[in-house]
Image (cartoon, grey):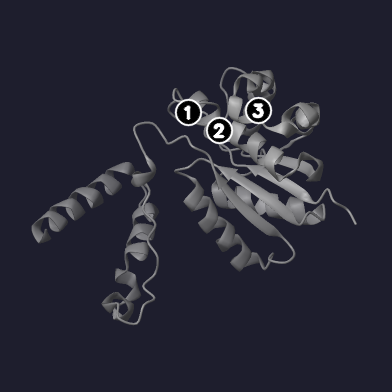
């Protein structure tokens, strides 16, 4: 039985994201960014069970080097790998000293996704890659504010493609919020599903999830701002 049946998907971060280094690495209070979170997850899960890492995406490019987002993130990970010795929540794990060189080798050989342009494409590309490699367990590592969207896209890709069995996905969120944000700035809107919920009986085009999809379908920032300003005015009238 092959025990190296786990892969890790590290979701990318646009290279123009505010405070990118903090989000990738460490916050001022020791909050783990995406890359240390991925390392800690592998150490906890069992490095000996990891066969592959995939890093996303191809949605941005470093204008100075020409490197694609995933390539920049992978190189940053390698360049800063030894600094993990200074992160007590990693270096104090018993598996760290035993497996750190194996971890380094896994990062060196990580696949960089240079084609995907969004989270859905990134997830689909990884799902296909892992299926082709016969991998059954996936640790999906993403930013804390981005992780809910990653879960939705994972479920959407499974629904649309039928890639369900035998892959088991485990979503892991890091501890680094976006600039000037917190966990409270992400709102998850489920479809109405309780029998006593009046929203379950209205036109589905009026549901919050449908309205937000229409919002993101707007073509320009000006249209989106107008939408939000109008909504704010109407909501304030009802409050």
**Is 24 left, or right, of 28 in this rendering?**
right
**Few, some or many C-alpha atoms within 10 Å of disc 3 (few <14, some 14-19, many ≥20)?**
few
Q: Is residue 31 left or right of residue 74?
A: left
- Is 13 drawn above or below residue 80 in the view shown? below
Residue visible at 80% across and 26% down?
A: 101
Q: Secondary structure at mark 1?
A: loop
The residue lying at 69 percent from left, 51 percent from top is: 138
* Closest to the observer, 131 or 193: 193
Comparing labels 3 and 2, the label whose residue is closer to the camera: 3
- What count of labels does the image hold? 3
For disc 1, the marked residue is 16
Q: Nearer the viewer, residue 16 or 46?
A: 46
Point out residue 98 in the picture as x, y percentages from the top left corner.
80, 30
- Give the spatial CA distance, label 2 vs label 1: 8 Å
- Circle 2 is placed at which residue position? 60
| Mark 2 residue crowding within 10 angstroms, few (<14) / some (14–19) / many (20+) | some
Question: CB atoms at circles 2 and 1 under 8 Å apart?
Answer: yes
- Identify the mark at residue 100; answer none if there is no mark: none
């Amino acid at each position: 039985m092959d025990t190296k049946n786990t892969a890790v998907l590290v979701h990318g971060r646009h290279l123009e994201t505010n405070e990118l280094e903090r989000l990738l690495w460490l916050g001022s209070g020791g909050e783990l960014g995406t890359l240390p979170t991925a390392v800690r997850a592998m150490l906890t899960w069992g490095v000996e069970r990891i066969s592959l890492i995939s890093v996303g995406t191809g949605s941005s490019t470093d204008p100075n080097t020409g490197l694609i987002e995933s390539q920049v993130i992978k190189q940053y990970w390698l360049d800063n790998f030894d600094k993990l010795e200074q992160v007590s929540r990693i270096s104090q794990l018993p598996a760290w000293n035993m497996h750190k060189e194996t971890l380094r080798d896994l990062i060196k050989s990580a696949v960089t996704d240079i084609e995907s342009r969004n989270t859905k494409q990134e997830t689909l590309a990884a799902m296909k890659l892992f299926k082709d490699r016969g991998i059954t367990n996936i640790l999906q590592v993403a930013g804390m504010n981005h992780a809910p969207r990653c879960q939705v896209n994972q479920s959407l890709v499974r629904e649309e493609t039928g890639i369900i069995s035998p892959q088991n996905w485990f979503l892991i969120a890091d501890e680094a919020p976006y600039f000037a944000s917190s966990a409270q700035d992400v709102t998850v809107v489920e479809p109405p599903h309780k029998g006593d919920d009046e929203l379950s009986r209205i036109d589905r085009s009026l549901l919050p999830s449908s309205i937000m999809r229409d919002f993101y379908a707007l073509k320009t920032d000006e249209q989106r701002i107008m939408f939000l300003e109008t909504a704010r005015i109407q909501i304030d009238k009802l409050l």
